[in-house]
Amino acid sequence: METSSTPSSAQRVVVIDDHIALNEMLVQVIGLQSGYEAAGWAATAAEGVELCRRIVPDIIVLDMVMPNVTGISLLQELKQAAPKARFIVFSGNLTPRMVKAVLGAGVQGVVGKGASIDELREALDAVRDDRVYFGSQVRDMVKDLVTQPDKVTHDQAALTPRERTILQCIAQGMSSREMADKLGVSVNTIVNHRSNLMKKTGLHRVAQLSLYAAQIGLVEETF
């Protein structure tokens, strides 16, 4: 279901969840946030994909547990329907395995359904700014994912001290501008460092870099 239009500068948000009442409540909440347009909602996977093809949202708020479809396959369909969209997984059935899978798939925000409205607002702001966001119910799961250092396969020694600092900043959800201000360098320098990090680690998404930072122990102060 599509909702009424607001100024084009607003971030267009689509909600996909099989609970209609929750969809309607989320649309109301999102519509009250400055800078966001609640562009529509869908209660089935097929409706969600079609809606995203039609209106091309900037952000998709998605429950990964939908009838008759696996969450990851739905995520891939939505990525094809709206290639530039950023994703927030909003689910009441989060497990460490699911969190690891969605981060690997490039999701930038993960929030449990027990979260406050403030957390959802923070998640929207984070993914809008190309940062990652882990809700309070998810942070311990992310910590648990990093307790098996023998599974880290990338060459940590190849990272320079500055690259390790930038990697830590990425895991803390900082934007390129925030990193540049903190380190006293230009945004272009940060972009170059991030590009080098991706080449060295073989990772190509911000969420994957964040998880990798956790795996090598760079986010102890973050969670």
Image: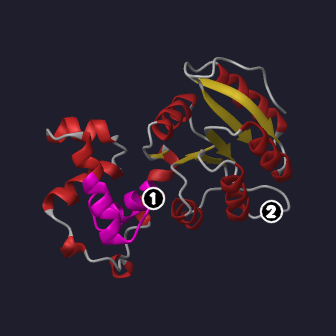
Q: Secondary structure at mark 2?
A: loop
Residue 5 in the image, given as x and y percentages of width and height: 73, 20
**Would you name the residue on which mark 1 appears?**
205
Q: Residue at x 14, y 61 (%)?
A: 161
Q: Secondary structure at mark 1?
A: loop
Q: Position of residue 141 (x, y in %)?
A: 48, 59
Residue 6 visible in this rendered orientation of the protein: yes
One can see residue 221 in this view? no
Q: Nearer the viewer, mark 2 or mark 1?
A: 1
Which part of the image, by quadrant, shows the N terminus? Answer: top right
Task: Reply above or below: 5 against 125.
Answer: above
Q: Which residue is mark 2?
A: 69
Left or right of 201 on screen, residue 98: right
Kindly identify the residue that appears in the image at 70 percent across and 53 percent down: 78
Q: Tell me which residue sits at (68%, 18%) in the image.
A: 6
- Write down the quadrant of residue 17 in the picture: top right
